Amino acid sequence: MVMAISMIIMAFTLSVAFSTRQKIEIISELKDHSQVRLKSYSAFNEILYNILISNFTSTEIKIILPDGKWKPWNLYGEPIVLNDSVTVKLRDTAGMISPVMQPGYMASLFSGTGASTANVNSFLDKLADWQDIDDLKRLNGAESWEYRTTGYPYTPRNFFVQTIDEIRLIKDFDNSILDAVRDDLTYWGNDHINYLTMSEKTLRAVLKNDKAVDSILKMRNDHILTGSYFTGLTGIQRTDTVMFAPSGAIKMEITSKLNAAVDRIEAVIAKRETQEGPYMVFEWKK
Ligand SMILES: [Ca+2]
């Protein structure tokens, strides 16, 4: 009898201890989650502040430190370690490729993934048909008839794509091609491009000159890359659409981690004053 009672008491004590331990684990996990969220938002504010008050070089933001010295934050997507738990990637959107403004460069990026020339050309025709207002099919294109007769539940928009991922809706499109270059595409197309803030992948795809790209990357790493050096290496001159300066529309990707908790913010911020405030938020993804 005594034995049975002490067994019951032991089982009860064990179960209380187990559920308490579980509760403590859940509470500490929740605490981690709210802390990483806080860290992401605080990083967002710090970056926004720095974008608004700092000077831009051709490839970087110069962050002024309290002692008057400065440190560079690159605008071509190399990870920047903000503190123990937060890493940030900043991209000048002028160094990214827009499917609306630079479809040819997007095709070069696609070719860089190993897509065949025939596939890329066929995609370009279909993209053009998707966006042009008429219903006249290009050589390798597709208009409403081609979509309807092959079982697609929709037809082309006949207007510019509204997001990058809308490209996935284009007839016969291979999603893995877009996945491979998604980070280098932007919807916030600029009227000018800045080669100096392109990623290595984009530079190799659009310049098709590995030797020049190697020199560009080396100079950029040494913080000495300028427009004139770039022109010297590639022959590409500054024009109305080619500028060797960031656009002021900056994409930021913030990742905060604490133990198993992860929080991400992705946003495109433009350094552009309106009546409502000193900046604009073009895109916000949490
Ligand atoms: Ca069309």
Image (spheres, helix red, strand yellow):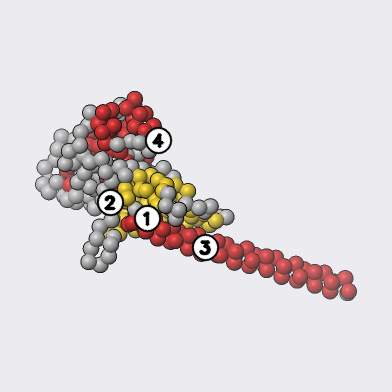
Frontmost residue, 203 versus 228? 228
Task: Look at label 3 and name its amino acid.
Answer: Gln
Between the C-alphas of marks 4 and 1, the distance is 22 Å
Task: Point out residue 259 in the picture as x, y percentages from the top left corner.
Answer: 57, 55
Q: Quadrant of residue 5?
A: bottom right
Per the rendering, the mark at residue 35 is 3
Q: Which residue is mark 4?
A: 222
The residue tagged with tag 1: helix, strand or loop?
Answer: helix
Between the C-alphas of marks 3 and 1, the distance is 22 Å
Q: Which residue is mark 1?
A: 50
Q: Is mark 2 within 8 Å of ligand 1?
A: no
Residue 65, above or below 7: above
Q: Is mark 3 within 8 Å of ligand 1?
A: no
Neighbours of disc 2 within 10 Å: few (<14), some (14-19), many (20+): some
Neighbours of disc 1 within 10 Å: few (<14), some (14-19), many (20+): some
Between the C-alphas of marks 4 and 2, the distance is 23 Å
Task: Point out residue 155 in the picture as x, y percentages from the top left corner.
Answer: 20, 50
Per the rendering, the mark at residue 248 is 2
| In this rendering, position of residue 97 left or right of residue 255 | left
Frontmost residue, 69 versus 207? 69
Frontmost residue, 59 versus 214? 59
Camera-near label (3 vs 4) is 4
